[in-house]
Image: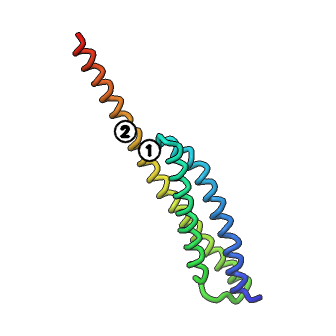
């Protein structure tokens, strides 16, 4: 087996389990967060599943497209260097996607909280107005 083929195989063997682990972690914790944002549990679950599918498609696609990056590997040292670079880039991309997701979810939750506060304020004003009209 040549070093380039070993590099490709190790890269896939390292990256795919990391993607699955991160995806499962995001799905498990994201479900709780989305349940807080959406009033309907079914909508939260469906949204979470769609986000997880998108996460897997995006990241597995990136890993497979990035497979050939780095060129030929001729030595064991070159294999380690190439593998660390490629896995490092994948981890950085995973981290970046995670940060973007957290920001989007935080904005969604903030909007939900603000909307709830507005509704409560309007209901309070409406109740006060109704009480005043009864006098």
Location of residue 37 with respect to 67 vertically, above or below: above
Q: Find residue 109 and report its image quarter.
A: top left
* Residue closer to the observer: 134 or 25: 134
Left or right position of 75 against 24: right
Which numbered disc covers residue 114? 2
Q: Residues within 10 Å of mark 1 (few under 14, many from 20)?
A: some
Estimate the x, y position of residue 117 in percent, counting from the top left: 36, 33
| Residue at the (65%, 69%) spot, across then down | 15
* Residue closer to the observer: 74 or 40: 40
| Residue at the (52%, 58%) spot, across then down | 50
Q: Find residue 11 and report its image quarter.
A: bottom right
Estimate the x, y position of residue 27 in percent, counting from the top left: 59, 53
Q: Residues within 10 Å of mark 2 (few under 14, many from 20)?
A: few
Estimate the x, y position of residue 22 in percent, counting from the top left: 62, 59
Left or right position of 96 against 88: left
Query: Is mark 1 in CB contact (under 8 Å) with mark 2?
Result: no
Q: Find residue 1 and report its image quarter.
A: bottom right
| Residue bearing the label numbered 1 | 109
Estimate the x, y position of residue 124 in percent, counting from the top left: 32, 24
Location of residue 98 with respect to 45 vertically, above or below: below
């Amino acid at each position: 087996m040549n070093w380039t083929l070993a590099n490709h195989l190790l890269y896939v063997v390292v990256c795919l389990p990391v993607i699955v682990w991160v995806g499962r972690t995001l799905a498990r914790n994201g479900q709780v967060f989305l349940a807080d944002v959406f009033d309907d549990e079914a909508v939260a679950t469906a949204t979470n599943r769609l986000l997880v599918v998108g996460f897997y498609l995006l990241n597995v696609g990136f890993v497979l497209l990035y497979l050939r990056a780095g060129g030929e590997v001729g030595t064991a040292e070159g294999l380690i260097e190439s593998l660390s670079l490629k896995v490092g880039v994948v981890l950085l991309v995973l981290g970046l996607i995670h940060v973007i997701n957290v920001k989007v979810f935080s904005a969604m939750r903030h909007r939900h909280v603000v909307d709830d506060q507005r509704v409560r304020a309007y209901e309070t004003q409406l109740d006060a107005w109704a009480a005043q009209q009864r006098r």
